[in-house]
């Protein structure tokens, strides 16, 4: 894949006239325990926090035994997002990025929640994978707390724990494990009661989940350990407020905290200086994970980090905007696409042919429903670059293999939501359109599918074609593909495939497709 998008499809830099605060960026971290809104200003790479809002939502505690998010938890989340939306009035879409983590990765009814949440917030919410969450956490830490020492960064969330090895600004290994302070507290400290046996059982459960990380994040691979997120911050404050440590989290300090919990007997009776009321319900699980980590990974002192996921999201958003403004800079997602092409041995010459043609058709179409920040064009380009990755599995039904791979792969920079969208695009690259029935209401996506399908048909012989051989127009609600008459007469097989395509759109698409000669 080329670094630069073809001339006809470079994303436009976000306009400054549609924002009251063009110098600001905002991120929303929808965690399993708390939702956080961070607003910041970046000037020449320097980070300045402008505002920070945090609410304890406990979304992770709202997953029932069937993996469904309860209506009560949903309402808590929506109410918080409504308050965030008030604070974000005057912000343009390109200035805001909202990400959701483990609870919505798990929730079976997450799509229903996201539809409601998107409307309330007024901005799309991306569900990110565990590895992508870990990458963004490290980006926040490494930018706000630079160091050249090999470091281990740990983030204990409500339902997952992320571990990252890095050096400088580069994460070298990032993994997510399905154990967090909320989930462990619910499972092992019933009714908020504390006993030595409960702590032992919780530590065994945490150790079983984290055991596979022992060789990946062993003590010999790092020289300093940092902890991000609310759990580390809360325990650090308790230890400092009680004069146990200077805020560093040590095995001795954790044993002291656990003993205080056991002596209190319950969350209600626990009254420690430095312990905020909203952290009480999840303290047992958080302490159990921290103590397990300290023992298994020989962490003598875990120090609170300055950065976290929400700052990493802002830095990542800044990189995307810089890539859009300065076309010589790659979007971080472009790098992932190139890596996927190499991993799955994509025919890059054909991918480039299809990509350039699809983007040219997209620009001709002038889709009014397209995103203002050019993301739809970028998604179409990525889908074209990756539409044949399923060939490595099998040539038969390769579009289905491509869709499956894109729907399940980890790709830095991409959210799970966007990868699922790319999966839908490549699934729709050929065959009947009935498989996209659930997307017929999404005019922009169906236009992307149309452009991708036409580009693949035009280049089905896997050869270059003259640039102006085909243009796509919008005519009274229809799409019209205008072909160069002389070229069409010399390519009857391509014309036959295009005529079949018009019948498919007439039968199952969201619009009519006409073929015209000029």
Image: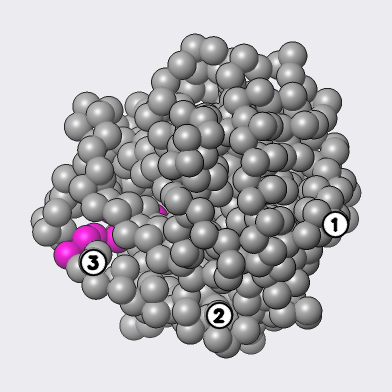
Residues 122 and 243: in front is 243
Q: Is residue 320 left or right of residue 428?
A: left
Position above or below: 223 against 34: above
> Which span of residues is magenta-colored?
90-97
Q: Is residue 393 left or right of residue 420?
A: right
Residues 52 and 435: in front is 52
Q: Mark 1: give few (<14), some (14-19) or many (20+) Cα within 10 Å.
A: few
- The residue lying at 54 percent from left, 12 percent from top is 149
Marks 1 and 2 sit apart, C-alpha to C-alpha, by 30 Å
* Mark positioned earlier in the residue sequence (3 or 2): 2
Residues 94 and 390: in front is 94
- The residue lying at 45 percent from left, 51 percent from top is 273
Residue where numbered disc 3 is placed: 87
Q: Is residue 48 left or right of residue 218?
A: left
Residue where numbered disc 1 is placed: 197
Q: Position of residue 192 (x, y in %)?
A: 67, 69
Is label 3 in a helix, a strand or a loop?
helix
Q: Which dot marks residue 73?
A: 2
Q: Mark 3: give few (<14), some (14-19) or many (20+) Cα within 10 Å.
A: some
Is label 1 or label 3 in front?
A: 1
Q: Is residue 414 left or right of residue 39?
A: right
- Looking at the rendered image, the quarter that the N terminus falls into is top right
* Residue 94 falls in image quadrant: bottom left
Q: Which dot marks residue 24?
A: none
Q: Is residue 94 magenta?
A: yes
Would you say the residues marked 3 and 2 are in contact, meaning their CB atoms lie under 8 Å apart?
A: no
């Amino acid at each position: 894949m080329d670094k630069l998008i073809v001339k006809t499809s470079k994303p436009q830099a976000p306009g400054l006239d549609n924002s009251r605060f063009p110098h600001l960026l905002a991120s929303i971290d929808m965690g399993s325990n708390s939702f956080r809104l961070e607003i910041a200003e970046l000037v020449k790479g320097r980070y300045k926090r402008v505002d920070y809002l945090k609410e304890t939502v406990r979304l992770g505690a709202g997953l029932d035994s069937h993996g469904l998010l309860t209506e009560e938890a949903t309402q808590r989340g929506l109410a918080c997002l409504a308050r965030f939306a008030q604070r974000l009035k005057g912000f343009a879409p390109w200035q805001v990025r909202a990400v959701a983590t483990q609870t919505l990765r798990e929730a079976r009814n997450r799509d229903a929640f996201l539809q409601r949440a998107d409307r309330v917030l007024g901005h799309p919410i991306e569900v990110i994978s565990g590895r992508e969450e870990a990458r963004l956490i490290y980006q926040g830490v490494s930018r706000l707390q630079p160091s050249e020492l090999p470091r281990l960064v740990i983030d204990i969330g409500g339902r997952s724990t992320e571990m990252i090895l890095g050096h400088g600004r580069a994460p070298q290994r990032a993994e997510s494990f399905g154990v967090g302070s909320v989930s462990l507290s619910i499972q092992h400290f019933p009714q908020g009661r504390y006993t030595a046996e409960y702590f032992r059982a919780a530590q065994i459960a945490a150790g079983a989940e984290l055991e596979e990380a022992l060789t990946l994040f062993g003590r010999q691979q790092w020289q300093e350990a940092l902890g991000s997120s609310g759990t580390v911050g809360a325990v650090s404050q308790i230890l400092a407020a009680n004069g146990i440590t200077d805020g560093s989290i040590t095995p001795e300090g954790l044993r002291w905290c656990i003993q205080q919990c056991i002596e209190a007997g319950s969350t209600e009776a626990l009254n420690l200086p430095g312990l905020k009321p909203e952290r009480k319900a999840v303290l047992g699980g958080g302490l159990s994970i921290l103590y397990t980590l300290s023992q298994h990974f020989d962490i003598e002192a875990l120090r609170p980090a300055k950065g976290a996921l929400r700052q990493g999201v802002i830095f990542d958003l800044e990189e995307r905007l810089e890539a859009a403004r300065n076309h010589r800079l790659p979007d971080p997602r472009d790098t992932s696409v190139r890596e996927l092409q190499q991993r799955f041995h994509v025919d890059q010459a054909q991918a480039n042919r299809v990509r350039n043609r699809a983007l040219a058709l997209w620009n001709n179409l002038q889709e009014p429903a397209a995103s203002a920040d050019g993301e739809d064009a970028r998604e179409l380009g990525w889908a074209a670059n990756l539409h044949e990755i399923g060939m490595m599995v099998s040539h038969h039904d390769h579009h289905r293999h491509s869709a499956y791979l894109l729907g399940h792969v980890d790709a830095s920079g991409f959210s799970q939501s966007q990868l699922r969208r790319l999966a839908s695009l490549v699934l729709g690259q050929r065959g009947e359109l009935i498989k996209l029935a659930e997307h017929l209401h999404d005019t922009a996506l169906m236009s992307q599918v149309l452009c991708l399908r036409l580009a693949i048909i035009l280049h089905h012989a896997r050869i270059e074609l003259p640039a102006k051989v085909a243009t796509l127009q919008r005519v009274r609600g229809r799409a019209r593909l205008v072909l160069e008459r002389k070229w069409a007469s010399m390519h009857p097989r391509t014309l036959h495939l295009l005529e079949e395509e018009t019948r498919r759109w007439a039968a199952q698409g969201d619009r009519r497709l006409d073929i015209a000669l000029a």
